[in-house]
Image (cartoon, rainbow, N blue to C red):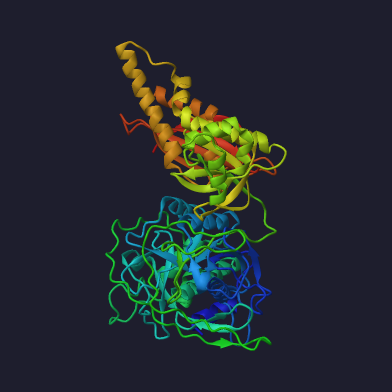
Amino acid sequence: MDAGLAAIWEETRGDPRIRIAVLDGPIDRTHPCLRDALLSEVPTLAPSTADDGPASQHGTHVASIIFGKTLGSFAGIAPACSGLILPVFASGPSNSLVLCSQLDLARAILQAVDRGAQIINISGGQLSRSGEPEPVLANAIQACADRNVLIVAAAGNDGCECLHVPAAAASALPVGAMNAHGEPLSVSNWGRSYRSQGLLAPGERILGAVPHGGLATKSGTSFAAPLVSGLAALLLSLQLKRGWAPNPHGVRDALIASAVPCDSNIENGRCLAGRWNPAGAMNLILEGGATMSEAIVDKADEAPSLAPIQSPERESATSLDLTSRASEPTIIASEALALTPATASPAAAQPTGRVAPARPSGIKPSDCGCGGGANCSCGGAGTPAQLVYALGKLGYDFGTEARRDSFAQAMPGAQANPHDAAQMAEYLRANPFEAESLFWTLNLDATPIYAVVPTGPFAAATHERLREAFAGQLQRGVELVSIPGIVAGNVTLMSGQVVPAIVPAVRGIFSWATQPLIENIVGARPTAGAERDAYDRRVSGLNSFLNRVYYDLRNLGVTAEERALNFSASNAFQVAQVMESATEGNLELDAINVRKSPVCRPDSDCYDVEIGFFDPRNVNVANKIYRFTVDVSDVIPVSIGEVRAWSRRA
């Protein structure tokens, strides 16, 4: 046992107020070492039922490293902390794993943030040349930084100077794996961004739980990451014990600052920022040396070029039977499983748990030799309803080829094509009852992020509103649709992608078209030359504002901040007030910020949305600030008070 870790354990084994989210495979909560752990399952798109598949093997092992109760010689690192289990990986055919897309990982991260996690452990990642996540995942990672939530992520097991997403994110804490002598494992990745913000932690033959009882050892960065997550949780618990506010990013700074350099004979960069040093980190915390950085430094613009990907080593695994079962499966990684770097694609699955073939891209677990990816389907129970206020464009899906063919058979005309949006809009206009046989989808940049499933006594009225908005996209230039509601399960699309299902609140479904909104604010275009030129300048500014609001601020509408932002930015009445005032002064949009409101009525959840403008003709002039206050405690957010405006120096 590490002497520094033993010293921390003398102070604390964790605090239930410290919450660690584990984004991994399903875990076996009936295992003797996890049976009494303070764990809550959060419904995600992946199945939550543990089995003997590789996803459950991986998830159970990772969770036990953090939360496992003492069992013989085994003990988790922070067993008294509470945990959130969010499955993102699932087992596929032939003992494989199905990939988790960056979109689904972002969704799980936001769920963890919304449920109060201070630390998020991600023992997986996607090989990336640049280390840059996709925009939706980047937004989720930024939400963690804004809320002071620490992401601890595996550095990857490709054995090369290469980066993994999300470990390479500027605000994350990437973790590499070392052996008992403090030397990096041959499979542990390194890279430019890891060098300044990554840690090496023990990752060879790490003991952990096996589903249905038993212990086994596994190797890789997947199992080094939960050790660091647990250590960070212990340090946060120590802060609480001293009466201080827990500071996850301050703890991150202490872990990096206290890292011990490797021996000089280790290849440059392979040691990352250094080896973990529990005693040194604890001393920094107790000395008050862990303060959150005022700004998180941006990553370098260029990532190192990829070295050839080497085959992972075979891990060493043993199992110890702790029950009456005759034997327990040993956990031995497959050899030489090629993991192709590519952009993430949605995972395919059925809600019944039937997993479709894996796609060769996405977030993968980071144990040695682990191939495949992750699946999405709903699981868990007993958690609060997930509120959503999402913006996007409407589409439709058939779910199955048979359903699509039934539409092709029913639609009139010799050239009937159910995939033709114009034909479908006309068919639904003539046969509105057929809308119930479709899945409406809400899309961001042509990627479905939700299925919209009207239910209840107002389902027909909701379908009518959705049909009108869909037709408006084709005929009247509708560019954006708002869908408020709650998440209730998931839907498998015809492509195999699984998306959350929103039960929408019909009174909050609205659509916007830029040109009519502009004409409503500035009127018709004048005919006179000078007046027409001034009008065109104002219209150009309005177009710029709307494009920025609608397309630069893309998000999933899950967290309270996202729902407040989406509601404020798409509230036509308030936006019209702001745009009219801003365009009169020829101002340009600078930034939009959301923060918790310092004053709020009881039983509400209020956020201030500030929209800042600057004068491009003179940047020395103070910025103009407009503030909305929004209560997001209900399904449909509510504006509180008037739009306030003032000037502020940039």
Is 499 rendered above or below residue 207? above
Pick the quarter of the image with the C terminus. top left
Q: Does the image show residue 290? A: no
Q: Is residue 420 left or right of residue 501?
A: left
Residue at 37 percent of width and 79 percent of height: 184
Q: Position of residue 195 (x, y in %)?
A: 33, 68
Q: Is residue 245 above or below residue 255?
A: above
Vertical arrangement, residue 489 with respect to residue 37, above or below: above
- The residue drawn where x is 60% and y is 49% is 501
Q: Residue at x 43, y 85 (%)?
A: 180
Q: Measured from the top left, where is residue 275 in percent x and y? A: 40, 76
Which of the pair 369/265 is nearer the observer? Answer: 369
- On the image, the x and y values in percent for residue 167 come to 42, 64
Q: Is residue 136 visible?
A: yes
Q: Judge by depth and name the residue closer to the eye, 350 or 20.
A: 350
Q: Is residue 78 shown left or right of residue 282? A: right
Task: Work out which residue is located at the far front of the displayed protein and give it.
Answer: 414
Residue 132 x %, y %: 37, 57
Judging depth in this view, the residue of 206 and 508 nearest the camera is 508
- Which residue appears farthest toward the top when viewing the image? 528
